[in-house]
Image (cartoon, rainbow, N blue to C red):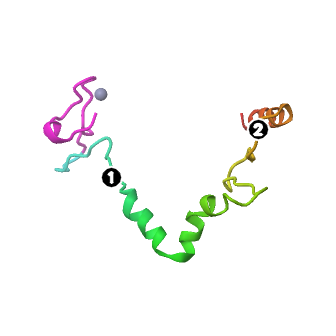
Amino acid sequence: MLYYLENVELTECMTCEHSRYKPRTGRGKTLMAYKNLRYFSITPRLQRLFMSPRTAKHMTWHQSDADQPNTKRNHANDPLEVSIGPITRARAKKLKEALNGLV
Ligand SMILES: [Zn+2]
């Protein structure tokens, strides 16, 4: 449950009635929540990456290399390395073997 806006004052979950805060131990006065939500604003981080020509080149490689034939456009960490093209029996078999290797 998100303790936000009209629920900001609640001290236990409306659904399961689990306490919002950890039980106090010792003489500590501050309430410690079980979980904290951190806001991660992605937009300014992406804008910063596109501001530098050096990093912008790495951010647009999928678009700038799209018109070149026979170019593999895989993510560097893609273990399957699925290339562009129609699915054939051989490619389907290779894909299935790669998936089985991951499981
Ligand atoms: Zn709950």
Q: Quadrant of residue 20?
A: top left
Q: Residue at x 78, y 32 (%)?
A: 96
Q: Main secondary structure of the magenta part?
A: loop
Q: Amino acid at mark 1?
A: Tyr
Quarter of the figure with the C terminus: top right
Q: Which residue is mark 2?
A: 86
Ligand 1 shown in quarter: top left
Question: Helix, strand or loop at disc 2?
Answer: loop
- Residues shaded magenta: 1-25
Q: Let me know if residue 17 is in the magenta part.
A: yes
Above or below for 70 versus 19: below
Q: Residue at x 26, y 23 (%)?
A: 15
Question: Helix, strand or loop at disc 1?
Answer: loop
Side of 57 where 33 appears, left or right = left
Which is nearer the eye, 90 or 98?
Answer: 90
Q: Residue at x 33, y 42 (%)?
A: 35
Which is nearer the eye, 57 or 102?
Answer: 57
Q: Which residue is mark 1?
A: 39
